[in-house]
Image (tube, rainbow, N blue to C red):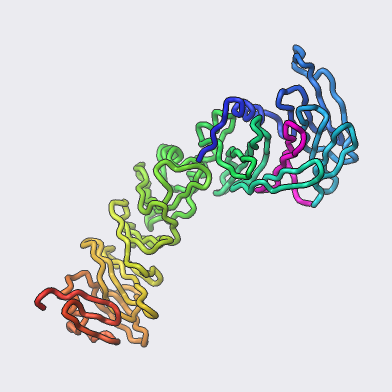
Amino acid sequence: MIARLTESERAAARRFLGAPAGHDASSDGRFTARPDGDRVLLGERAKSPVSDGQPEKSTRIPARGFEVEEATVADDGQTVAFVGRRGKDSLLAISDGGAPRVLLDDGLSVHSPDLSPDGKTIAVTRCYDVVTVGLDGSKTTLAKMPDWAERVEYLPSGRLMVEAGFDGWGTGRVPILYVVEPDGKFEAVADIPDAEALGLAPRAPMLKQYEASFPGTSAEQRADLLERFGYNTPSMRILSPDKRRMVFDVHAKRVPIAQGEGVYVLACDGSAPRMLAPGGDLREAHWSDAGKRVALVLHDGLSVAEGDGSRVRQMPPNAEAKDAAWSPDERYYAFHVKTGDSVAVYVYDCEKDGIYPVLPRARVEGWRDGKIEALFEDGTRMTVPPFPIDPEQGVGLALGGGLPRPPGQISVTDEYVDLNGVRVPRKRGE
């Protein structure tokens, strides 16, 4: 989901994003706080702002020998908090005119303090965490963000806005906004166009990430992909041998995806990506030699797809891609199916869209002269033609048919021939 902002929250977001790093103002703009060496510079405007917009008066508050890096002030102008450095980062607070008190001093980083409007709680960022700290030193890790949390700000509603950033492909930081609810749940504030309207500039660095993650695509194609997937970049992508196509999976890690998350195939010719497996989680992909077809290892099994995405066929349950192999002409895909404590060789005929058993208790070793090289469990090797033939011919091959009979148990019923659990249907009247 995408978090919705009220008009007052949008105005607060624009002020937050436009403010210099380390500076803060109360929600009504009357009080300001900013670093000033080893002091906090607290400014107070008149209730009616003076004409030049500058603070009417300012006060420098000593920071107990800390170098002030960032400061914040509550709406009452009496409660101030700041991040100070003296060998390490510390969070300190001043209330009721007293001396600064250390609230966090555990050696971990602390950044972007912001006091709640009532001055009772301070929100800070600590790497990926958003933490709230009470004036008594109590602390709560409110949320762990999916991206590095850089700044945090209380909104008028009491929710928190977090500016985060990521650089998954080493092309430059991409800024993104999140809203964190008081219960710790969070959602992205906006996708690319809305983020730009609030004052962020994610488009250019995001397009650089797309250029790295979708090599060979044109600028126009990357712009189209950005509109489709937004802040979400591929979790995995595998190029075809000629580098003109790729399969990838993309998930709604940051913002929703209108056409759905899952596994896609993309041709580098300006065309749109095509969905291969809705909701799929891509683990491996094995392209045929010329990139005409691809086998997909997904979280729920093995599938074979046309390289243009026009057809996807799921292989039998317990199918395995380990040691599987494409035929040199890209027509056949030889793979294994687990049968109890053993495996059997199967083949998928892409032209006939048929799945056929080949040999029980054997593994694929590769292809030679258009035939499958198989290794049986007892060490026997056999080279056999693929099995994209009708069941009547399949029975003949399995029972001898000019080839050595495969080892193991063979039984024949009125309905099928069973080769150690691999059942080949018989024609009626056979």
Residue 219 showing in the rendered view: no
Whole-percent x, y for residue 342 in the image? 37, 80
Q: Is residue 419 above or below residue 205?
A: below
Going by the image, does 130 lie left or right of 367?
right
Point out the image quarter for the C terminus. Answer: bottom left
Q: Is residue 254 visible?
A: yes
State the residue at coordinates (72%, 40%): 123
Choose top left, top right, bottom left or bottom right for residue 10: top right
Residue placed farthest to the left in the image? 429
Q: Nearer the viewer, residue 397 or 169?
A: 397
Q: Quadrant of residue 396?
A: bottom left
Location of residue 318 in the rendering, given as x and y in whole percent from the top left corner: 37, 70
Looking at the image, which residue is at 47% across and 42% down?
A: 256
Residue at coordinates 26% horizontally, 67% vertically from top-left? 355
Q: Which residues are magenta?
A: 107-129
In this view, the residue in front, 354 or 326, is 354
Question: Is residue 125 on the magenta stretch?
Answer: yes
Q: Quadrant of residue 292?
A: bottom left
**Toward the viewer: 402 or 264?**
264
**Residue 369 located within the stretch drawn in magenta:** no
Residue 341 x %, y %: 39, 80
In the rendered view, does 400 fall on the left or right side of 315?
left
